[in-house]
Image: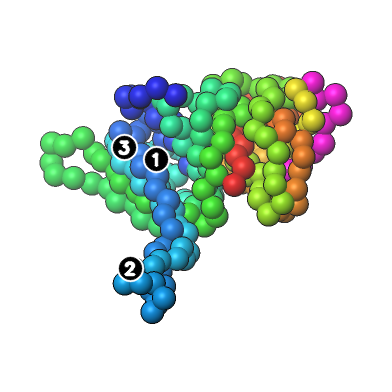
Amino acid sequence: MSKTVLTSVRCFAVGVDLTGNSNKIELSAEIEEKDATNYASQGWGEVMGGLASSELSGEGQWEAGDPSKVDDASWSQLGGVGPWSVSANNAAAVGDLAYLVNAMRSEYKLGEAVGEVAPWTGTAKGSWPVARGQFAHPPGTARTATGTGTGLNLGAVAAGRRLYATLHVLSVAGTTPSITARVESSVDNTFASPTTRLTFSAATAVGGQILRTDGTAITDTWWRMAWTISGTTPSFLFTGALGIQ
């Protein structure tokens, strides 16, 4: 990937696309530094890695009025834990680089001086490890029927590591619409005999979910999202990402 000027970072928080209401998104991850210096360290400091932590912070223009707006979403999510997916190269097309994390919305601030564009700022603290992966479904493609997504060559999952998956349902239409998304793996890109690795709960409204495998090794190297849709004239806009950590 070449050098990038940030002009359209995509950020999905639970069931909301913050792209049109944000002008700054930051994701940080760090390992706590623990002093382990002793008499055998030969006069040099010695450190060990302690607890890992992550944080998402953002800011932008305030809007309110329905669940897709930043104010409604921030208030409803405050203190709650949910999925976040952030792009790193101005896009969220299938295969684009993504960072996934399960995070608690810990802070929300709004308001400014008279005459200023109404702003918001917010922070979310990671509750699971940050996973680096790829977007597996684009946010702007409406789905009205059961189907499967494009395969991604993410690689195998070693023992002790996990496959992480996010689902962000951004809009829902129709009569009694329901979508049940899942993550499938395969030995190759044909998906001739795919194995279901994760299944999200059925979604009937805007919202988000994050799942992960149990740490058992998986030798399959190809992955994709698939979904089952039901209802009368259902239509869903959703996005999701997959990553191994």
Neighbour tally class for label 3: few under 14, some 14-19, many 20 plus, Cα within 10 Å: some
Q: Nearer the viewer, residue 8 or 171?
A: 8
Image quarter of the N terminus: top left
Q: At label 1, which amino acid type do we have?
A: Val
- Left or right: where 244 falls relative to 17: right
Question: Is residue 195 on the magenta stretch?
Answer: yes
Q: Calculate the distance from the C-alpha at mark 1 to the C-alpha at mark 3.
A: 14 Å
Which residue is tagged 3?
24
Residue 37 on the magenta span: no
**237 up-or-down from 163: above or below:** above
What element does badge 3 sit on? Answer: strand
Q: Quadrant of residue 9?
A: top left
Disc 1 element: helix
Which of the two residues, 155 or 146, is positioned nearer the viewer here? 155
Using the image as rendered, state which of residue 217 and residue 94 is in the foreground: 217
Q: Secondary structure at mark 2?
A: loop
Marks 2 and 3 sit apart, C-alpha to C-alpha, by 40 Å
Residue 37: horizontal and vertical position, in percent? 38, 74
* Residue visible at 35% across and 72% down in the picture: 42
- Residue at the (43%, 32%) spot, across then down: 88
Are the residues at dot 1 and dot 3 in contact (C-beta closer than 8 Å)? Answer: no
Q: Quadrant of residue 189?
A: top right
Q: Residues within 10 Å of mark 1 (few under 14, many from 20)?
A: many
Q: For mark 2, what is the residue? A: 44
Judging by the rendered image, the residue that carries numbered circle 1 is 70
Q: Is residue 79 visible?
A: no
Under mark 3, the amino acid is: Lys
* The magenta segment: 190-198
In percent of width and height, residue 228 lies at 76, 31
How far is mark 1 from mark 2, CA to CA? 49 Å
